[in-house]
Image: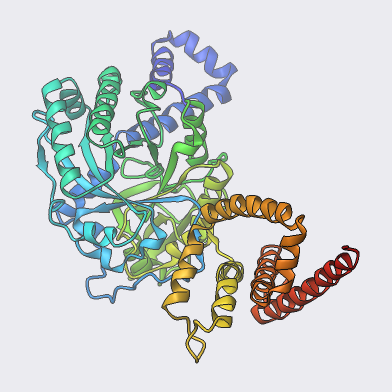
């Protein structure tokens, strides 16, 4: 499925160096085959150029240089807080990169729809291992916001881009040691949960050094804190083959497939940023193939997160046709910009093969100037989340949080596709089951307030039921021996006479039977209503006492 680029280039070289006579003969006899091969060569060379772009670096530069084509266009829009119902819980990991430039966007996030946030980023100085910058990692209130929500994980992204930078850093053991030491300090300072290594463009020649770096980093982090985790980004297409998956699999907690920019700035035709499939229309590289490749490379599907784009790409094209040739690369656009400036004004289509959204339109006032915008919206996102489910991946990733500010459609998809509903009726029933017995008994004993509210005594008894497992086994153990002792004791005539002739003991007996009946009926879920349970308990206790008492009296008549 994925093959070395050199194979195609070698084929091209052979064609060019053949003699003119041989070349002409081959072309005449197999013109169609030659054309197909030639098309394949240039087709895949287009993908090679795209594979050598570094997505996160590109976005960082756009933001740093204030390139207008990456503007959200929403500086004055009212931000929308993402709201969700309470009766759900995430069934998959939902991982999101949080770029430093999004500042206080965390105030609009609903953290119940996220499990993991990776702050972007510690930018590595490849010569020293020290950071060129960590931005405001040490002060950002994002950390405090996350810590208000239980079971959410915070990572520090560590970024290094380009073959030269990665090669220079990875072979420098002192720089590796400095980086590792700095990371331990920074994680500890913000009480974080680990790191996300985002090294894009690692050359094949650095494969061994990259493996050594990841294993060393894992060992050092685990020694500092056994709970620290390492996430590692991997490219959509592993052209460089610079990762030894079998060697690092146990050292890495999650692998994040950067499932975007299959078509981008170097592409000769406009196309899907994150295609589900290719068919005969698109490059043979797509999300499905990427996932299959990494699973076949030895990464368990339970460790794979498929990251999807919350942005799109705009090109000026020759016409409005699918796969139209590119005249000019306009730029990357956030989903916020696309929805406000393009989608609201143009018809949106879903490509039936790639399952990606796109707009094809002529500029206003320039009827012969055509543009195409390819991106992911809520409709196309569903197809990609279905892939995560079908392949049984660990979860979904997002590049990047804040790119859809002002809109909630993507989060609606996450709630519907990545979460499972909680049966509130069952939950309420279980809660009632825990407390109804205690409540009934307490109210019967007069420990509840006159208006029926639970007082402190009942609250304490109810809290005990939270330890139901330990309590259950303890009660079973005690009841077993207590019951055995009772049976042995009642075999004695003196015990029977004492038990059924003393009114005080009779009251204890009836109460004991009452509680036992209530507990048994409640555990079997035969009846849920507390009042009915009390009535049945009293009746059962009275009848049991009556028949046992009659039995004892009959036995006493036969005594001498």
Residue 531 lies, in percent from the top left, at 66, 82
Q: Residue at x 51, y 68 (%)?
A: 87
Camera sees residue 355: no
Q: Which residue reaches farthest front?
A: 560
Residue 93 vertical position relative to residue 145 in the rendered view, above or below: above
Give left or right: position of 356 versus 479: left
- In front here: 512 or 169? 512
- Place of residue 83 in the rendered image (x, y in percent of width and height, measured from the top left): 41, 71
Picture residue at 59% right of the left edge, 74% below the top: 436
**Image point (25%, 62%), residue name:** 145
Q: Position of residue 295 (x, y in %)?
A: 50, 31
Q: Quadrant of residue 432?
A: bottom right
Left or right placement of residue 200 versus residue 419 in this view: left
Q: Position of residue 34 (x, y in %)?
A: 52, 22
User: To which quarter of the image does residue 426 belong?
Assistant: bottom right
Residue 201, compared with residue 497, is above or below; it is above
Q: Is residue 330 above or below residue 169?
A: below
Point 72% across, 51% down: residue: 488
Say if residue 381 shows up in the picture. Answer: yes
């Amino acid at each position: 499925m994925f093959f070395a680029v050199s194979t195609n280039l070698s084929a091209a070289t052979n064609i060019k160096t053949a003699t003119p006579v041989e070349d002409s003969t081959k072309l005449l006899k197999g013109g169609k085959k030659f054309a197909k091969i030639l098309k394949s060569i240039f087709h895949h060379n287009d993908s090679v150029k795209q594979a050598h772009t570094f997505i996160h670096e590109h976005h960082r530069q756009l933001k740093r240089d204030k390139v207008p084509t990456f503007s959200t266009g929403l500086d004055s829009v009212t931000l929308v807080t993402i709201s969700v119902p309470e009766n759900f819980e995430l069934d998959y990991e939902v991982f999101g990169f949080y770029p430093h430039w999004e500042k206080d966007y965390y105030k609009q996030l609903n953290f119940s729809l996220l499990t993991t946030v990776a702050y972007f980023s510690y930018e590595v100085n490849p010569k020293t291992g020290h950071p060129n910058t960590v931005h405001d990692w040490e002060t950002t209130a994002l950390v405090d916001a996350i810590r208000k929500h239980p079971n959410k994980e915070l990572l520090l992204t560590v970024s290094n881009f380009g073959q030269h930078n990665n090669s220079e850093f990875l072979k420098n053991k002192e720089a590796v040691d400095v980086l590792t030491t700095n990371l331990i300090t920074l994680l500890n300072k913000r009480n974080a949960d680990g790191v996300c290594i985002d090294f894009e463009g690692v050359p094949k020649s650095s494969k061994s050094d990259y493996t050594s770096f990841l294993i060393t980093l894992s060992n050092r982090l685990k020694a500092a804190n056994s709970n620290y985790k390492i996430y590692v980004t991997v490219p959509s297409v592993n052209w460089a083959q610079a990762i030894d998956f079998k060697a690092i699999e146990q050292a890495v907690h999650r692998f994040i497939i950067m499932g975007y920019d299959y078509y981008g700035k170097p592409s000769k035709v406009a196309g899907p940023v994150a295609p589900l499939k290719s068919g005969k229309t698109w490059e043979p590289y797509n999300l499905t193939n990427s996932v299959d490749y990494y699973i076949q490379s030895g990464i368990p599907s339970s460790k794979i997160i498929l990251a999807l784009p919350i942005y799109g790409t705009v090109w000026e094209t020759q016409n409005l046709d699918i796969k139209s040739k590119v005249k000019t690369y306009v730029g990357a656009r956030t989903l916020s910009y696309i929805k406000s400036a393009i989608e609201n004004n143009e018809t949106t289509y879903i490509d039936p093969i790639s399952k990606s959204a796109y707009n094809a339109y002529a500029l206003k006032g320039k009827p012969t100037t055509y543009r195409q915008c390819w991106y992911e919206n809520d409709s196309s996102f569903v197809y990609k989340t279905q892939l995560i489910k079908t392949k049984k991946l660990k979860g979904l990733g997002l590049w990047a949080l804040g790119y859809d500010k002002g809109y909630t459609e993507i989060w609606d998809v996450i709630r519907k596709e990545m979460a499972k509903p909680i049966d509130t009726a069952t939950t309420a029933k279980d809660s009632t089951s825990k407390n109804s017995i205690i409540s009934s008994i307490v109210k019967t004993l007069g420990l509840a307030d006159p208006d029926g509210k639970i007082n402190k005594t009942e609250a304490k008894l109810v809290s005990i039921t939270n330890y139901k497992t330990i309590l259950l086994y303890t009660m079973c153990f005690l009841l077993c021996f207590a019951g055995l002792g009772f049976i042995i004791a009642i075999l004695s005539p003196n015990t029977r006479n004492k038990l059924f002739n003393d009114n005080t003991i009779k009251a204890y007996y009836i109460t004991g039977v009452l509680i036992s009946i209530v507990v048994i009926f409640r555990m079997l879920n035969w009846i849920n209503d507390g009042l009915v349970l009390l009535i049945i308990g009293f009746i059962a206790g009275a009848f049991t006492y009556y028949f046992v008492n009659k039995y004892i009296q009959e036995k006493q008549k036969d005594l001498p």
